[in-house]
Amino acid sequence: MVGLIDLVEKLTTPHPLDRYLELVRPTFTLRQMRAEITHVRRSAVGSVTLTLRPTRQWQGHVAGQYVQIGVVIDGVRHTRCYSPVNSDRRRDRHIELTVKAHPHGLVSNYLHENAIPGMVVDLAPAAGIFHLPEQRPDRIVLITGGSGITPALSMLRTLATEGYAGKVLFLHYNRSPEYVPHRTELEALALQHNNFRVEMLYPELGTDANFSYDELERLAPWFASAQTYLCGPPGLMKAVRTVYEAEQLADRLHSEEFVLTVAPGDPATAEGEITFSGSGKTIENTGASLLEQAEVAGLTPEYGCRMGICFTCTAVKRTGCTRNLRTGEVDADPDQPIQLCINAPVGDVDIAI
Amino acid sequence: MAMLTETPAGPVVLSREQIEEIGAALDEIRARVTDDLGERDREYIYSIIKAQRGFEIAGRGLMYLGFLPPFWLAGVAALSVSKILDNMEIGHNVMHGQYDWMREPGLNSRVFEWDTVCPSDQWRHSHNYMHHTYTNIHGMDRDIGYGILRVDEAQPWNPLRLGNPVYAFFLMLAFEWGVMGHDLEVENIVQGKRKWLDVKALLKGQIRKAGRQVLKDYVVFPALTGPLFLSTLAGNFTANIVRNLWTFSIIFCGHFPSGVQTFSEEDCAEETQGEWYVRQMLGSANIDGSRLFHIMSGNLSHQIEHHLFPDLPANRYPEIAPEVKALCEKHGLPYNTGSFSQQIGSVWAKLFKLALPPVLAGKPQPAGVIVVRRGQDSEVGV
């Protein structure tokens, strides 16, 4: 198949074959993976669950991993990462994503309001090391908060489909019951599997306490012999880590950071650190353009006009927020190509040069 | 032809305040357009891409009926349109970064390749960087004559210049190859200013890219039509030539008609953004025409707007052109535009005139605009 594609691309050169096929149908691509939204469900307050049918390149995910999707909003393709919430044993190759609409989240709000069946998104292969080991541990603790529930949900559903016989505690923190996505299904899972304990706690309602050693000890006295998977907001992550470190169980705790696009700070102030991850250098931000700061740091990135017209100095910004010195526009999206000569960092920034 | 700006009292003089005012007005236009970019621009570029692909497939398909002359001609016409759209409204503009904001991997300036023998990375250097940064500065902008032609009085005359129109004619026929060789700076190699070693990597890239293009147009597609091999080969060759004639003509109308100014390095030292803008306006020329004409020229018929804002999507140029023109009129600046026949006629007249030694060619045009910089008058332009 690949040989045949190569042959046909001799004819379409210099354009890849997909650039022709996608014009016929966006999911007709041979190399580039995409997915079509087949179902949209808005059950929990503030979140939407999408069922996606990926194109044939999809190789599946391992419960706990995430995928990156690309969504076009007002002409611009934005990419975000979400963890599939379905069991990784799902036979029809579809994936299910639950997206929580964050207050300033462009993509999450867009999907929450506008996602309809038939919409096509870009899809990258599943990635991430936050997943269950192939050899299942005898005891598992899943601790999540807010939208951190998604990878753990996939894990729990996978364990349920494969008839896992060990003990599981699923501990989830949220604002109130109506915000918990897939709540009724979680409760049903707990009823069907008496080795699964599902606990939903709502500290903000005043009915439950925040996470603590005592709480964990009460719900899963066996937690020290379990493998624990943790994903949630920074406060919860910190509280859980503190407990596990005190118990010298840090090696049994597996966690995934929330990749939230942080709202940029005050663009006028020069704060934070610039990491040039391609060369392993880190310097204090002085507020000058990234090109100038890279040169001060002793790097020699390729450049041309130094005024934003020739695009020679374009490099990939891995993470962080940058401000366009010509337009004042700020960009906080990860993995974006930016022009070094007319962009300055706002806070911590990682540039791949 | 007299400079448009020449008044009975002499050339137009621009004060420093005026230049800053022009710069601010242009920055404002730019900001307004960048704020407004969105779905409309996306739809526009994809509609052009769809049209280009349609013409390409039609052109390749019609070659199977190439034994019937009308079909052969239709095939050549469709393929020519496809190649022109690919090179101009798509390739040239995408590689300027005009659609980078869309974050579409297929329309990214860093990775886009176009349907000509010139590798896109080399073109981005010679065109996006050298030409667009140092527009019309002698010794910096190699587009002044492309190292072959005499297109400005400030280039010295020698007897070899007598062949000027002949060189131009051959450059026109083989324009894509000329564009490919542009970044090699062959005359600098001949003069010993550039070593062969420096161009080894460039040559490698050119052989690779040109090889694929030649294989596609002159081997694989002709072979696919079996007994019509020669007819298809001739059709593809003709389409490439048609594209060359057209792109050469449009591009030469952008900077070489009468009335455009050139500059010296001293003129442009330590330029402000406003002065840079003024230089771009004085050094470029537009072509009047219909919407279809503008699309087929990649909107390089709006060369003035393109040089002011090379990274704004080209479909925006016609929209902002009236404002740029009004700004020029307000300050008495030339806004060099004319019909295609006027502009291309003026280009060829210049190519013939500058073949002759200065004694025969007559006096060079005086500068039409004098710009006051840091308290001093500058003779030619900025």
Image: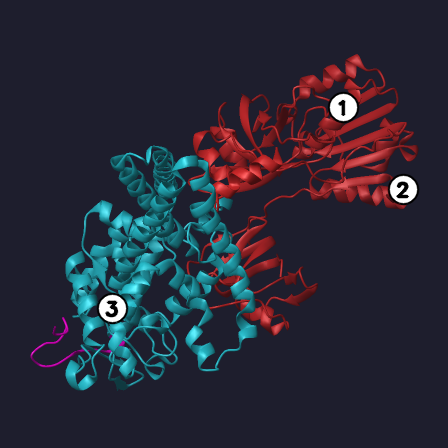
Residue B256 numbered mark, or none: 3
Of helix, strand and loop, which mostly describes the magenta segment? loop
The crowding category of the residue bearing disc 3, from other C-alpha atoms within 10 Å (few below 14, some 14 to 19, many at least 20), is many
Marked residue chain, label 1: A
Query: Disc 3 to disc 1, how far (Cα)?
Result: 69 Å
Residue type at numbered disc 3: Phe
Quadrant where the N terminus of chain A is found in the figure: top right
The structure residue drawn at horizontal position 42% and vertical position 58%, both measured from the top left corner, is: A327
Residue reaching furthest to the top: A192
Disc 1, SS = helix
Q: Nearer the viewer, residue A88 or B61?
A: B61
Position of residue B345 in the picture relative to residue B116 (left or right): left
Residue A113 position (above or below residue B134): above
* A352 to the left or right of A246: left
Q: Is residue A107 above or below residue B298?
A: above
Residue B120 visible, this orientation: yes
Image vertical order of residue A252 relative to residue B213, above or below: above
Q: Nearer the viewer, residue B292 or B216?
A: B216
- The residue at which mark 2 appears reads as A249
Indicate the amino acid at tag 1: Thr
Asked if labels 2 and 1 share a chain, the reply is yes
Of tags 3 and 2, which is closer to the observer?
Answer: 3
Instruction: Tell me where residue A128 sits by quadrant.
Output: top right
Q: Secondary structure at mark 2?
A: loop
Q: Is residue B242 above or below residue B166?
A: above
Observer-side mark, 2 or 1, equals: 1
Chain A: what color? red
Q: Which chain is cyan?
A: B
Q: Which contiguous range is marked in magenta?
A: B1-17
Where is residue B259? Give x, y as percent. Answer: 19, 71
Marked residue chain, label 3: B
Give residue A158's mark. 1
